[in-house]
Image: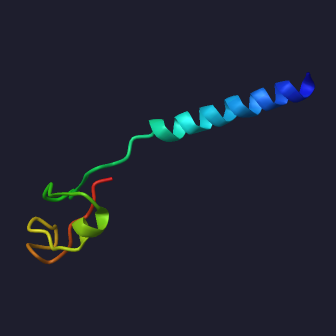
Amino acid sequence: MKLKTSMFALAVGAVVVAACAVAAPAVKNYYCKYCGLKSSSIASLTSSKCQRHPDGAQKGRHEPAL
């Protein structure tokens, strides 16, 4: 009986972990904190220069608003 209880607890624990992994939403868009430009990845957002950067237009790159 002890073995069946342990296996049941293990199976229930695996289901709970799987449910938590599915429930976490993924970020789909990233925005520049200076100008609001939207991008699907941080790499593509920060690869170009920002028109409203505090150092001046085109003087710095977009920065993600995390």
Farthest residue toward the top? 1
Q: In which quarter of the image is residue 32?
A: bottom left
Residue at 76% across, 27% down: 8
* Rendered residue at 37%/46% (across/down): 26
Residue 50: x %, y % from top left = 13, 69
- Residue 34, image quadrant: bottom left
Image: 29 above or below 23: below
Residue that sits furthest to the right in the current view: 1
The N terminus sits in image quarter: top right
Q: Where is residue 30 in the image (x, y as percent from the top left)?
A: 26, 55
Query: Position of 56 compared to 47: left or right?
Result: left
**Horizontal side of residue 54 vs 46, given as left or right:** left
Q: Where is residue 62 in the image (x, y as percent from the top left)?
A: 21, 67
Q: In the depicted view, which residue is nearer to us: 6 or 33?
A: 6
Residue 24, quarter of picture? top left
- Residue shown at 25% from the left, 52% from the top: 29
Q: Residue at x 83, y 24 (%)?
A: 5
